[in-house]
Amino acid sequence: MRKIKKRLKMSKFEKLLYTLALFLLVISPISIVFSKATLANINYEVERQKQQIEEQQRTNESLAMTINELASLTKIQEVAEQQGLSYNNSNIKTVSENK
């Protein structure tokens, strides 16, 4: 006697479920890798921006120190003397506003 193989018939819904499960099984690892790569890229950009901010803060502090140094009275007097000007306290007049 011959063995008769019975073939199970799948409904359209079962085929759809199997196809969907296979699709999710293939796409899940790809999407996980893609999301991890995107997250790593964003973290890299954040760190780069932090370094730029720190560098700009150091530059700002240096410029503020330079401004304070150039605005000091001794520097002003030095520049005035180089320009041929002199500091005469008797020529300074104070004007006050009366209310």
Image (cartoon, rainbow, N blue to C red):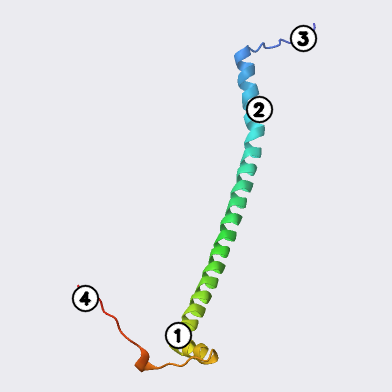
Looking at the image, residue 58 lies above or below residue 92: above
Assign a secondary structure to mark 1.
loop
Query: Type of residue at label 3?
Result: Lys
> Which badge, 3 or 1, is on the more N-terminal residue?
3
Residue 56 placement: quadrant: bottom right
**Residue 98 or 26: which is nearer the viewer?**
98
Query: Type of residue at label 1?
Result: Ser
> Which badge, 3 or 4, is on the more N-terminal residue?
3
Residue labelled with disc 4: 98
How busy is the neighbourhood of tag 1: few (under 14 within 10 Å), some, or many (20 plus)? few
> Which badge, 2 or 4, is on the more N-terminal residue?
2
The nearer-to-camera label among 2 and 4 is 4
Query: Type of residue at label 2?
Result: Leu
Marks 3 & 4, CB-CB < 8 Å contact: no
- Residue 94 rendering spot, x and y as whole percentages: 30, 84
Marks 3 & 1, CB-CB < 8 Å contact: no
**Residue 33 or 70: which is nearer the viewer?**
70
- Residue 46 rendering spot, x and y as whole percentages: 56, 56
- Residue 95 rendering spot, x and y as whole percentages: 29, 81
Check residue 72 in the rendering and tell me which mark sits there, or answer none. 1
Q: Give the distance between the C-alpha atoms of the residues marked 3 and 1, in whole angstroms.
A: 107 Å
Q: Give the distance between the C-alpha atoms of the residues marked 2 and 1, in whole angstroms.
A: 76 Å
Q: Give the distance between the C-alpha atoms of the residues marked 1 and 4, in whole angstroms.
A: 31 Å
Residue drawn at x 26%, y 79% is: 96
Residue drawn at x 50%, y 82% is: 70
Assign a secondary structure to mark 3.
loop
Q: Give the distance between the C-alpha atoms of the residues marked 3 and 4, in whole angstroms.
A: 121 Å
Query: Type of residue at label 4?
Result: Asn
Check residue 22 in the rendering and tell me which mark sits there, or answer none. 2
Residue labelled with disc 3: 3
